[in-house]
Structures are given as structure tokens and as C-alpha cells.
Image (cartoon, helix red, strand yellow):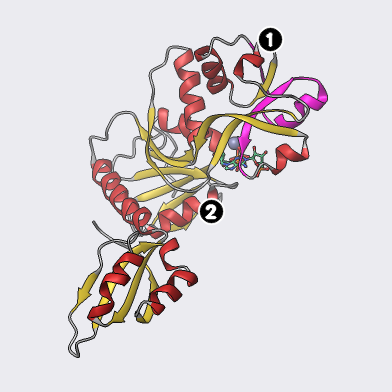
Amino acid sequence: MTPPLGSATRDRLRIAIQKSGRLAEPARALLASCGLSWRESRDKLFCYGESLPVDLLLVRDDDIPGLIADGVCDLGIVGRNELDEQAGARARIGLAPAYRALRGLGFGQCRLMLAVPDEWEWTGPEQLQGTRIATSYPAILTEWLEARGIAAQVVELSGSVEIAPRLGTADLICDLVSSGATLRANQLKPVETLLESEAVLAGPAGSFDDARADLAQMLLRRMDGVLQVRERKLLMFNAEREALPALERLLADAGPLVQLPSSNGVLTLQTMCGEGTVSWQRLEELERAGARQLMVLGVERSLA
Ligand code: PRT
Ligand code: ZN
């Protein structure tokens, strides 16, 4: 049965993630690769953790910081943009920070940027004096403007920010950008970055003092293991000893080259490396330098 929200469930950890949207699938996939599995409830708002006492709450991303602040959820996966905006809004009314980013998760990357109509000749932030800027991130924008002594009017919009200049409700915008296609389609160009964002694991400002402390620590350790090996490859090959110096030069951007025991005089070598080190071109160069039976393996898990 779904426990009532807001109740003090002290022996289970509750994580808020986006129900649907950009961060929903990668957040679930990350938690699943940390060994979590769930029984879905009918209302699809609450997923009861089966493999571990870690439950999921599926919500709108905007609600995640508040759920952590109110203690309804213990952790959440949310964009840094959302977390910083709500922390900024709290600070502006004198409230203490109630949550913090515990880990950057390497997905959901985007930038919070100022974008001006294409015909503007951008000379710098001083040009913003007296303008109207449409945004869904009023706290971050206001802080940025204040830090530069710029008096501009912040026009808060909850969506479709990019059409504000054409509608005449603002002169320029401050919005999230990833590919930049939306800006281009609206005859806008990005000019300043206010924030580099990605999905983060957020937690309360304080620490847990019950069973959730151990659960959160275990989850973080597993998450670190997953994040460390993501995009990591294990490269294995055989080579004659004479080829070693040339191969080491070609693998300067990889981890230490480890020799495995071998019987017939041919060395068996392995190294951990990034995607770029095992491109087809690099493998062919290694082959020309004497590497044989090259093999590239994906890394699933690691405990450092
Ligand atoms: O329903 P709910 O409130 O949960 O979802 P939402 O609509 O508020 O959020 P969603 O799913 O759109 O975004 C969730 C999070 O994804 C954001 O808070 C960011 O942290 C992150 N993210 C990454 C982005 C983008 N990339 C992004 N491109 N969020 C929004 N966008 C917008 C952008 O502003 C533009 O309008 O997507 C559009 C396409 O961007 P371009 O630059 O590729 O054209
Ligand atoms: Zn939202």
C-alpha cells in the first residue's frame, strides 16, 4: 500500500524523479543501474522499491526541490537550473537553503542563456539597461543582473518564453538552450551564459540521522561506481615486448597499461580508457604499431 505522503517513513528512502519529460527516462535508468527495482502502483505516482527499501515518487520537475525542502522526499533528480532557481527564490525571501546538489549526473545538459533578436548587435551586458527580459528563471536572472548593476525589467513567464520578443512583451529572453534550434527558429541568438546545467542528485541541506543515512550512502557509492565507468572502456590486446614503447605512446591518454600473465612470450595487455581512445582510427594505429587481437569491452560496474 502507498504510504501517505509527508509521513515520517524513517526506514525507507524516498526519491523524487520527473514523471515524464527530458529527465524521466535517464533518471530511472541510472537508478536501475544502481540495482534498484520497483513495483509500479496503479496511480503511477509512487513506485514501491522491491530490491531495496528505496521508493520513487514520480512528479513534475518543478515540485522536486520543494518536496525535499518539506521532507516529503529524501532525494531527488532534477536540473541544476530548477534547483538553483528555487534556492535563489528562497534566499530572496530570507529562507535558508533547504537542499543541495550532491552529484552532477552527466545527462540533461543545457545552458541558461540570454538570447537577443538576430538583428541586435551585441556589445555586452551594459546593453541590457532599461530592457525587458522574459524568463521562467526570475531569481537566477535577477541575481545575475544585480551582480552587474544592471537595471532591467524581469518579465516572468511560465512557458513559450522564446516568442515574447515577437509578441512585444519583452525585448529579449533568458531561457534554457541545448541545440539552439528553438532560438534559431524564433530569430534569436544566444549571447551570454548564466548557468551551465545538468541533472543533479539533490538532497537535504542537513544529513539523515536514521536508517536513511546508510541507504543514501550506499546509493551514492553505487551511483559513483556507475558514473565513473559510464563511457569507460576496457581495451585488451596482445603484443610483442618490442612494440611496447610505441603502443604506450599511442595510449598516453588511457589509464595505466597492465600486463596480464602470459606463457608464450607474447604480452597480454589491458587498460581502462575513454571512448576517444578506442575509435576505429586509433585501433588501426595500434594495430600498425604491433597490437594484435584488439578487443574493446564496455564496463558495467565498478567499486573503487
Ligand atoms: O512536466 P514537467 O514540469 O516535469 O516538465 P518540464 O516541461 O518543466 O521539463 P522538461 O522535461 O522540458 O525539462 C526538464 C529539464 O531538462 C530542465 O529543467 C533542464 O534541466 C533539462 N533540459 C535539458 C532542458 C533542455 N535540455 C532544453 N532544451 N529543458 C528545456 N529545454 C528546452 C529549451 O528551452 C527549448 O525551449 O527545450 C527546447 C529545445 O531546446 P533546443 O535548444 O534544443 O532547441
Ligand atoms: Zn517543469
**Residue furthest bottom as drawn:** 264
Q: Which residue: 34% across, 80% down?
A: 290
Question: Circle 1: is it few (<14), some (14-19), or many (20+) Cα within 10 Å?
Answer: few
Check the image and report above or below for 182 versus 95.
Answer: below
The region drawn magenta spans: 152-178
Residue 270, x across and y down, in percent: 28, 72
Question: Considering depth in this image, is 188 or 135 the residue closer to the camera?
Answer: 188
Q: Which residue: 38% across, 25% down?
A: 98
Question: Mark number for residue 302?
Answer: none
Q: Earlier in the sequence, mark 2 or mark 1?
A: 2
Res 125 seen here? yes
In the rendered structure, the answer to whether residue 74 lies left or right of residue 167 reads left
Residue 166 forms part of the magenta stretch: yes
Q: Which residue: 50% across, 35% down?
A: 196
Question: Mark number for residue 25?
Answer: 2
Task: Say which amino acid is labelled 1.
Answer: Gly
**Residue furthest right as drawn:** 167
Residue 72, x across and y down, in percent: 42, 34
Tell me the residue that label 1 is attached to.
130
- Hey, which quadrant is residue 187 in on the image? top right
SS for callout 1: loop
Res 41 seen here? no
Quadrant the C terminus occupies: bottom left
Residue 121 forms part of the magenta stretch: no
